Image: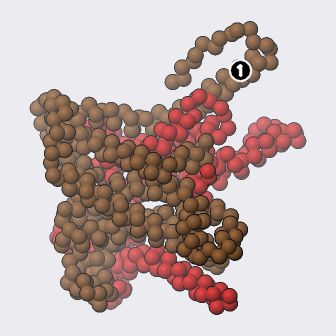
Chain colours: A brown, B red
């Protein structure tokens, strides 16, 4: 694991030598302590990813394993010229942008309330952690039943809205189904967002806001000129993590529609190719593309916020 | 001034009510649904609370061997993954917080990259590898990937906690005559325990919740966890899912989450936001 570089002994003075020896020992111990964690992390990510890269160059179906042939970038060509791939990518991006946007606004409002509130803090913290802790599959079922045409209460409760009838079928067409999926996603993850934002909010010195108030800044000015700029690191971490998480959306779609009504996401498409159709070659190519997209996304978000991530997490 | 203060209080109350409704309404809804009789949900019952409350669903689910087995799998796999992951993460986080070694930044970057990794893209190759290694449809087959995906979170949380520990106190205790084991046990362990505990809770939540790998790397109830098993509760009519059964299973599987949240809410919040806002 650790490559021991030969230490040059160029007649160091005695205390210095003890120092370097000590540093070397610390270096070794440090590496030994992180090694098991690093091995486990790489074993299940880097190694399979390299294997996916290799398999993606073959036409390889598990049902006919002998019929494996090298097609080089053929799978990628097939995928990139398939409208299905682009439709699913579009769905995923749409879900990501809308859910993260809504979560940011609602989560910020929640964080403001939690910051201001002086009573029932424990009750509130407990309640807000329940959607965070609940299994996504359970959230998906709960919302599927909420929107259900036979057993849901949405149609009865919101009958007075012009676009909702007692027999609105929420899983009957694309936009209704997308809406239901996004509601489940937003419900479950807004609390997480609000906790991260609350942590950022409580870092802003109260007198800074007071000073702006004394100087006659309006509520909106205080929000946009004082509060939000000072929360940039927290917002950035929240957006980065949630956006990448939303891009991987799978559980909600699997439970609520199984991809019907064109609600399939990129993750769902990859899963379907690999597990349901056993197309290991094509599926691997999709895996590689998904991985590259996530990488690109992370890069874009980090660039957009211009924040050093390790500094933002205090890992210096 | 007085009126604006009162407006503020009213606004906060309103916000409080809104947050409570947001968080708890769907939970109350599945609880209510779990007390509706199967006959009622099959016929269609759009009202919020049951016409007649029944505990039949709970009796049925306890008698369902597939569900109880899945529950056992979920507990076994989630607890094992938590235990192993936290042990490895504690070693790594101690090194990151306390020692100077080459490659520290690389370890942190790796952890960060894995936290963002699209799990689905591993399903294909892992499926293939696990079949050759005979790990497909076994507990270790899920425990190992769960460890990899929870290690980043655990390492971050723990290293953020460990950095705050006043390690000099260990030496101070030794100066005062404690043996090094006593100093470690009586001084360092109590200081580090809350962080380790928090990391364990977050790890457990992840493993308890995981779905993609759970449906891809299992094929029978020998290792299927509850989320995976629930997606196979289809019943006789695919267009009319067994609502009350599913709702009851949902409630049962949410109980541990609620208990953990009730007991440790403060720690969970501290863990989730550890290190996320500095800088």
State how many labels appear.
1
Q: Position of residue B272 (x, y in %)?
A: 55, 57
Local secondary structure at mark 1: helix
Can residue A246 be spotted in the picture? yes
Q: Is residue B161 left or right of residue A302?
A: right
Identify the residue shown where x is 50% and y is 39%. B109
In this view, the residue in front, B197 or B25, is B25
Q: Quadrant of residue B269?
A: bottom right
Q: Residue furthest front?
A: A215
Residue B227, compared with residue B177, is above or below; it is below
- The subunit letter for the residue under badge 1 reads A
Q: Residue at x 69, y 25 (%)?
A: A23
Residue at the limit of the structure toward the right, as seen here: B176
Residue A303 vs A87, above or below: the answer is above
The residue at 20%/50% (across/down) is A85
Is residue B228 rendered to the left or right of residue B196? Answer: left
- Could you say which is closer to the camera, residue A235 or residue A196? A235
x and y percent of residue B31 in the render?
40, 77
Q: Position of residue A201 (x, y in %)?
A: 60, 65
Horizontally, is A125 left or right of A8 in the view? left
Which percent across, then down, holds residue B132? 28, 33
Residue B61 appears in the figure: no
Q: Which residue sits at x=26%, y=87%?
A: A162
Q: Which residue is mark 1?
A: A20
Q: Residues within 10 Å of mark 1 (few under 14, many from 20)?
A: few
Question: Where, quadrant-wise, is the N terminus of chain B in this rendering?
Answer: bottom right
């Amino acid at each position: 694991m650790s490559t021991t570089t030969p230490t040059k002994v160029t007649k160091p003075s005695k205390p210095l030598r003890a120092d370097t020896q000590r540093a070397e020992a610390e270096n070794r111990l440090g590496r030994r302590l992180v090694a098991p964690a690093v091995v486990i992390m790489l074993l299940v990510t880097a190694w399979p990813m390299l294997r996916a890269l290799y398999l993606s160059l073959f036409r390889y179906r598990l049902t006919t394993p002998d019929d494996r042939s090298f097609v080089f970038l053929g799978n990628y060509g097939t995928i990139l010229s398939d409208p299905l791939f682009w439709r699913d990518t579009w769905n995923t991006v749409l879900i990501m942008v809308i859910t993260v946007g809504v979560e940011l606004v609602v989560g910020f409002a929640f964080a403001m309330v939690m910051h201001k509130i002086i009573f029932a803090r424990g009750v509130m913290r407990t309640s807000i952690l329940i959607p965070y802790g609940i299994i996504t599959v359970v959230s998906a079922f709960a919302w599927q039943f909420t929107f259900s045409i036979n057993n849901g209460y949405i149609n009865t409760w919101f009958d007075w809205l012009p676009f909702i009838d007692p027999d609105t079928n929420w899983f009957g067409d694309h936009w209704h189904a997308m809406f239901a999926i996004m509601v489940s996603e937003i419900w479950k993850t807004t609390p997480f967002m609000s906790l991260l934002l609350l942590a950022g909010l409580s870092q802003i010195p109260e007198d800074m806001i007071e000073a702006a108030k004394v100087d006659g800044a309006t509520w909106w000015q205080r929000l946009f000129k004082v509060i939000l700029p000072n929360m940039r690191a927290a917002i950035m971490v929240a957006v980065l993590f949630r956006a990448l998480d939303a891009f991987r959306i799978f559980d909600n779609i699997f439970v609520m529609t199984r991809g019907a009504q064109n609600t399939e996401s990129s993750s769902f498409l990859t899963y379907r190719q690999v597990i349901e159709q056993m197309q290991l070659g094509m599926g691997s190519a999709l895996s590689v593309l998904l991985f590259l997209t996530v990488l690109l996304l992370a890069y874009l978000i980090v660039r957009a916020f211009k924040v050093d991530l390790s500094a933002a997490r205090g890992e210096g | 001034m007085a009126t604006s203060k009162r407006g503020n209080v009213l606004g906060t109350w309103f916000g409080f009510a809104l947050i409570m409704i947001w968080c708890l309404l769907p939970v109350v809804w599945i609880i209510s649904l779990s007390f509706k009789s199967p006959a009622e949900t099959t016929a269609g019952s759009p009202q919020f609370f049951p016409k007649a409350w029944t505990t039949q669903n709970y009796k049925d689910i306890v008698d369902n061997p597939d569900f109880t087995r899945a529950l056992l799998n979920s507990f076994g796999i989630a607890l094992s993954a938590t235990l192993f992951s936290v042990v490895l993460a504690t070693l790594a986080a101690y090194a990151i917080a306390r020692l100077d070694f080459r490659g520290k930044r690389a370890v942190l970057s790796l952890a960060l990259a894995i936290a963002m990794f699209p799990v689905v893209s591993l399903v294909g190759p892992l499926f293939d590898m696990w079949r050759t290694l005979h790990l497909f449809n076994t507990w270790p087959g899920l425990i190992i990937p769960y460890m990899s995906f929870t290690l980043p979170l655990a390492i971050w949380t723990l290293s953020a906690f460990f950095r705050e520990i006043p390690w000099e106190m260990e030496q101070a205790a030794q100066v005062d005559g404690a043996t090094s084991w006593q100093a470690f046990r009586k001084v360092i362990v109590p200081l580090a325990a809350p962080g380790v505990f928090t990391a364990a809770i977050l790890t457990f939540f992840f493993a308890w919740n995981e779905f993609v790998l759970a449906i891809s790397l299992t094929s029978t109830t020998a290792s299927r966890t509850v989320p995976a098993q629930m997606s196979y509760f289809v019943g006789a009519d695919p267009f009319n899912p067994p609502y009350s059964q599913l709702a009851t299973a949902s409630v049962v599987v949410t109980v541990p989450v609620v208990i953990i949240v009730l007991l440790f809410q403060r720690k969970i919040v501290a863990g989730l936001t550890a290190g996320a806002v500095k800088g």
